[in-house]
Amino acid sequence: MHTELPTQLTGTAAPTLMWAREDEIEPQALQQLRTIAALPWVHGVRVMPDVHLGKGATVGSVIAMRDAVSPNAVGVDIGCGMNGVRAHARPGLRGGLG
């Protein structure tokens, strides 16, 4: 099944866009995202494909806050990340990428 990304997480107070399908995310992480999005100072949430339950905040999320700072939003995975790289490869180009 092909899903156009990003998708809007259902049941959130603040807009929560996800670059992952809702059915691929553990239920505890989805609940954590909804809880974070319900905080009155949260303006929006963005969710990356590597999302999973975290301590204090969901790993793989970006939380936009207005007039607030939340030290708990910095998880134990600080420094971990995702990279997007545009590759100019052609189909059938075996061995030419290494």
Image (cartoon, helix red, strand yellow):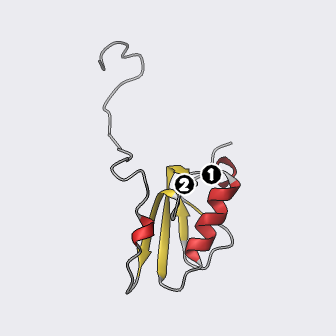
| Disc 2 residue type (three-letter) | Leu
Residue 37, given in percent of the width and then of the height, sits at 56, 74
For the residue pair 9 and 40, the one nearer the viewer reads as 40
| Residue drawn at the location 37% of the way across and 47% of the way down | 80
For the residue pair 41 and 16, the one nearer the viewer reads as 41
Residue 83, given in percent of the width and then of the height, sits at 35, 44
Residue 60, given in percent of the width and then of the height, sits at 47, 54
10 Å neighbourhood of mark 2: few (<14), some, or many (≥20)? few
Q: Mark 1 points at which residue?
A: 21
Snapshot quadrant of residue 27: bottom right
- Up-down: is 75 above or below 16? above
- Disc 1 element: loop
| Residue drawn at the location 30% of the way across and 20% of the way down | 97
- Up-down: is 9 above or below 3? below
Q: Mark 2 points at which residue?
A: 5
Q: Residue furthest top?
A: 95
10 Å neighbourhood of mark 1: few (<14), some, or many (≥20)? some
| Residue drawn at the location 40% of the way across and 84% of the way down | 66
